[in-house]
Image (tube, grey):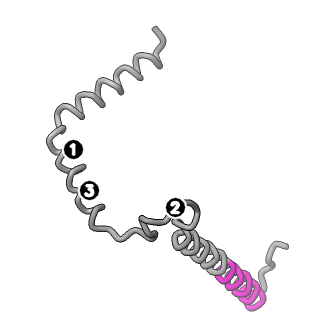
Amino acid sequence: MNLWYILYFAAGAFFVYYLLRYRVTIIKFVGEVRVELDKCSWPWDPNQTGFKKYKELRDSTVVVILSVIMLAGYVTSCDWILGHLVGALTGTTMLK
């Protein structure tokens, strides 16, 4: 037997032990998660089908991605400007 097989077996045995020891807690947690997810308002109409169903979700994702790109550009620009400004005031050189 290879050492990796022994480690895989030990990890599997630990996983099974963990599931058996805490099965009541795990089942209770999964049940509570299911109840909370039923309360959620999902961003699509359940009667729609196809890609129209995910229009709001897709549009929200595009807004988030564009916002992150704009924020990254703003932070990078401020860092570049302040780095050159501090470099000019202190007499240190910036790498090009």
User: What range is drawn magenta here?
Assistant: 73-90
Q: Amino acid at mark 3?
A: Val
Question: Is 75 in the magenta?
Answer: yes
In percent of width and height, residue 50 lies at: 56, 60
Q: Amino acid at mark 1?
A: Ile
Q: Is residue 89 left or right of residue 71?
A: right
Whole-percent x, y for residue 91 in the image: 78, 86
N-terminal of the two: label 1 or label 3?
1
Q: Give the mark nearer the N terminus: 2 vs 3.
A: 3
Q: Residue at x 28, y 62 (%)?
A: 38
Q: Which mark is residue 93?
A: none
| Disc 2/disc 1 C-alpha distance (Å) | 34 Å
In space, the residues marked 2 and 3 are separated at their CA atoms by 26 Å
Query: Which label sits on residue 33?
Result: 3
Q: Name the amino acid type tagged 2.
A: Thr
Residue under label 2 = 49
Q: Is 90 on the left-hand or right-hand side of 31?
A: right
Label 3: how many Cα within 10 Å (few below 14, some 14–19, many 20+): few
Main SS class of the magenta portion in the image: helix
In the drawing, what numbered circle is on residue 26?
A: 1
Q: Residue at x 17, y 33 (%)?
A: 21
Residue 35, quarter of the rendered image: bottom left
- Nearer the observer: mark 2 or 1; the answer is 2
